[in-house]
């Protein structure tokens, strides 16, 4: 691989140290600090001599010295390579302090942030079945249709998708999203009301930065989504948890909070509450909008998996009933297509969208234009809509398979309602069982589950598991439940 790139090395012609020694030392330093690895190919002597402006014989002498000392090996007709078996000590005659790898710690202080995010979950070990938080199955992604759309975009005559674009996102995608949200979710939005982001997490981060100042109070569901809380905290917010019951977030608790102190914003997941999957009732929705309108409070609505509803008619978002411009609507295409395709969006009054796009340019000049244009093609062709229907049918089958397996194997230990939508199930665990110990034992049996305390704003959290079913086949779900049953601890 190194031969496909120009290798930069430093030599000083004015130094009293011979050039071939300087060059050999430079290579050794790069080996010791990990820049050059065993087996890497060194540049040809002619090419390196030209790039450094020195004689080819000088490079040849340096390479011979490296081979003699054991740092490199020469292979006839192929070239010179870093040795696969390097010497332990620095070779004789090449003294001086070897350069180390990048320091393990910074040489300056870092601000202390109260963050719970740990940089994403590690990749599961082979054979481990993961009940995640509700991620879709990448095996179902419309990869062939997406690759065709990418090819058309990248091979187009103008190839304008490879240039600098609009920080708000591709105009065609914003127009398509506005149309989709108008038809399917009742949002009276135009393209100027839409900002495309690299996933919903970027959307939440930008919204938090635009809305909040240090010390602002933000009401959140007491059981909820930690990455969103982290985005709010980074903007300086003070989070106050509101109880969640079978009807969703307790809006009366919000009213009581607002009577005591100013509230700047409310973060809520009303369609399929995260993590419990319950739906905020119509009465509470109306009351929430009334409180927000009267007190001029921003409502950040995270509608993370709206496409996946299996029974009855999907409930329209809060934003569809907002007449005062209080609701900031956040959604994602990543749940629909694949988590690795980072496409989220914000729908809000145009002035806020302009502010968000200005903030976005500070960290990300624009989005992924080829991906965004490819998504436009899939939307216009109806491929994304067809994929949504196929995925919805499959996830319904998987939801039912998980519910049946839980009833059969763990009916006396867990209790749950079969969710009407979403990609996960909230299983409440018998209080006589230690849910934390159960999760640890499950890991040793080759199944990963997330206990309720991971979703609690404060305190121990409920005795429960959030079991994502979308990314596992029915057979994998049944096997995962079997392993979970084997790991069940004794009752206390």
Image: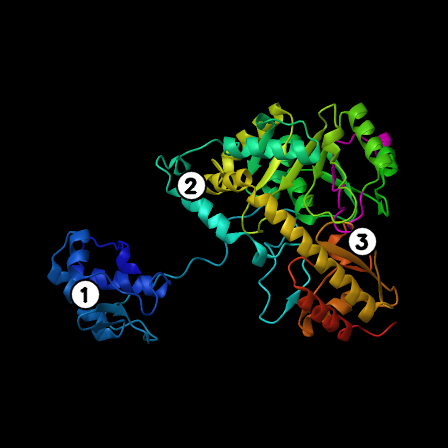
Instruction: Specify the quadrant of the image occupied by residue 216.
Output: top right
Earlier residue among tags 1 and 2: 1
Magenta stretch encompasses residue 294: no
Return the residue at label 1: 62
Q: How many marks?
A: 3
Instruction: Label 3: state its secondary structure.
Output: loop
Magenta span: 257-279
Magenta stretch encompasses residue 266: yes
Residue at 82% in and 69% down: 408
Residue at 74% in and 23% down: 324
The residues tagged by marks 1 and 2 sit, at their Cα atoms, a distance apart of 48 Å
The residues tagged by marks 1 and 3 sit, at their Cα atoms, a distance apart of 64 Å
Circle 1: is it few (<14), some (14-19), or many (20+) Cα within 10 Å?
Answer: many
> Where residue 178 sits in the image (x, y, percent)?
61, 31
Circle 2: is it few (<14), some (14-19), or many (20+) Cα within 10 Å?
Answer: many
> Where residue 339 sits in the image (x, y, percent)?
58, 51
Return the residue at label 2: 153
> Where residue 189 sits in the image (x, y, percent)?
64, 27
Looking at the picture, tell me which residue is in the foreground, 364 or 174: 174
Q: In front: mark 2 or mark 3?
A: 2
Circle 3: is it few (<14), some (14-19), or many (20+) Cα within 10 Å?
Answer: few
Tag shown at residue 459: 3
Q: Are marks 1 and 2 in contact (CB under 8 Å)?
A: no
């Amino acid at each position: 691989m190194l031969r496909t790139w120009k290798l930069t090395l430093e030599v000083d012609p004015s130094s009293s140290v011979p050039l071939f020694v300087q060059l050999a030392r430079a290579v050794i330093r790069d080996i010791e600090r990990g820049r050059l690895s065993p087996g890497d190919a060194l540049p040809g002597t002619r090419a390196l001599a030209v790039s450094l402006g020195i004689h080819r014989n000088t490079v040849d002498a340096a390479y011979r010295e490296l081979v003699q000392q054991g740092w490199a090996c020469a292979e006839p007709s192929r070239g010179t390579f870093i040795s696969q078996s390097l010497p332990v000590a620095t070779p004789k005659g090449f003294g001086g302090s070897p350069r180390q790898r990048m320091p393990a710690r910074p040489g300056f202080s870092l601000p202390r942030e109260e963050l719970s995010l740990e940089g994403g979950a590690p990749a599961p070990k082979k054979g481990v079945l993961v009940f995640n938080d509700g991620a879709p199955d990448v095996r179902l992604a419309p990869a062939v249709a997406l690759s065709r759309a990418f090819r058309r975009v990248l091979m187009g005559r103008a190839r304008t998708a490879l240039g600098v674009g609009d920080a708000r996102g591709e105009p065609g995608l914003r127009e398509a999203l506005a149309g989709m949200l108008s038809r399917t979710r009742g949002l009276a939005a135009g393209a100027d009301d839409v900002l495309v982001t690299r996933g919903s997490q970027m959307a939440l981060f930008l919204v938090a930065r635009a809305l909040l100042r240090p010390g602002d109070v933000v009401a959140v569901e007491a059981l909820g989504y930690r990455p969103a809380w982290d985005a709010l905290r980074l903007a300086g917010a003070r989070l106050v948890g509101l109880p969640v019951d079978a009807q969703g977030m307790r809006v009366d608790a919000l009213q009581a909070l607002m009577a005591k102190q100013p509230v700047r914003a409310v973060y809520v997941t009303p369609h399929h509450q995260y993590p419990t999957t319950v739906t905020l009732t119509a009465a509470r929705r109306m009351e929430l909008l009334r409180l927000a309108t009267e007190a001029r409070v921003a409502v950040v609505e995270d509608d993370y998996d709206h496409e996946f509803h299996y029974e009855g008619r999907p409930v329209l978002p809060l934003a569809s009933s907002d007449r005062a411009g209080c609701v900031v609507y956040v959604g994602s295409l990543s749940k629909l297509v694949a988590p690795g395709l980072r496409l989220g969006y914000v729908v809000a009054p145009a002035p806020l969208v302009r502010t968000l796009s200005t903030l976005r340019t500070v960290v990300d000049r624009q989005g992924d234009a080829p991906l965004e244009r490819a998504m436009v093609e899939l939307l216009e062709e109806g491929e994304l809509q067809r994929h949504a229907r196929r995925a919805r049918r499959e996830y319904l089958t998987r939801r039912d398979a998980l519910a049946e397996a839980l009833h059969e194997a763990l009916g006396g230990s867990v209790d749950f309602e079969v969710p009407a939508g979403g990609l996960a199930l909230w299983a409440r665990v018998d209080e006589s069982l230690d849910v934390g110990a159960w999760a640890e034992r499950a890991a040793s049996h080759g199944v990963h589950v997330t206990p309720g305390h991971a979703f609690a704003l404060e305190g121990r959290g409920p005795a429960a598991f959030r079991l994502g079913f979308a990314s596992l086949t029915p057979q994998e779900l049944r096997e995962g439940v079997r392993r979970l049953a084997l790991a069940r601890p004794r009752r206390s």
